[in-house]
Image (cartoon, helix red, strand yellow):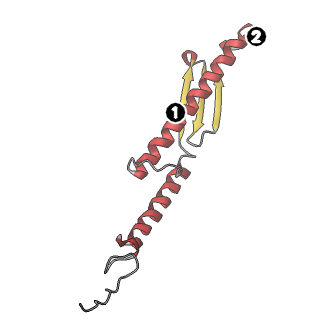
Amino acid sequence: MAKQKPKRMIPGGVPGRGAGGMGGGDMLRQIQQLQEEMARAQEALGSETVSVSVGGGVVQMVMTGHQRLQSVTIAPEILNPDDAEMLQDLIVAAVNEAIERSQQLASERMASVTGGLNLPGLF
């Protein structure tokens, strides 16, 4: 039997295709576009806010999408030295709720960029 010459292959192992046979340049461009969109969405979160109100509206807080507290408003009628513990509890509840809503906002915005893909470590 005669020996056959091996076929010449383009890197990636598939004739006529780039690295990995997947059109690597296109995929890289798409990944770069996704990264740019995610960076823009992440930056925009800094100017978006969530507002929370607890205790029937006596404590209100505003937090950015970057989980930065912007403001705290406490109704004057709740400022009673005998009720300091209740005020402290309301503030803790408001901060925790504001953080939770801010994280939810960030998650929603990033999901709109990634199309709902779960990309651990990217945001």
Left-right relation of 8 to 44: left
**Figure label count:** 2
Q: Is residue 95 above or below residue 113?
A: above
Q: Residue furthest bottom?
A: 2
Residue wearing tag 2: 81
Q: Residue at x 41, y 74 (%)?
A: 19
Q: CA distance from mark 2 to mark 1?
A: 30 Å
Q: Residue at x 60, y 24 (%)?
A: 94
Residue 67, label in figure: none
Near mark 1 (Cα within 10 A), the count class, few <14, some 14-19 or many ≥20, is many
Q: Residue at x 63, y 39 (%)?
A: 68
Left-right relation of 28 to 123: left
Picture coordinates of residue 14 (x, y %)? 33, 76
Foreground pick, 107 / 64: 107
Mark 2 and mark 1 residues within 8 Å of each other at the beta carbon:
no
Q: Earlier in the sequence, mark 2 or mark 1?
A: 2
Task: Look at the image and tell me whether residue 75 can be seen.
Answer: no
Secondary-structure class at tag 1: helix
User: Which image quadrant: the N terminus?
Assistant: bottom left
Picture coordinates of residue 112 (x, y %)? 41, 48
Task: Look at the image and tell me whether residue 92 can be seen.
Answer: yes
Picture coordinates of residue 62 (x, y %)? 59, 33
User: Please, what is the three-letter code of the amino acid marked with disc 2?
Assistant: Pro
The image quarter in which residue 86 lies: top right
Residue wearing tag 1: 101
Q: Residue furthest left?
A: 1
Picture coordinates of residue 21 (x, y %)? 35, 72
User: Please, what is the three-letter code of the amino acid marked with disc 1?
Assistant: Arg
Near mark 2 (Cα within 10 A), the count class, few <14, some 14-19 or many ≥20, is few
Q: Residue at x 60, y 18 (%)?
A: 58
Foreground pick, 122 / 10: 10
Q: Nearer the viewer, mark 2 or mark 1?
A: 1
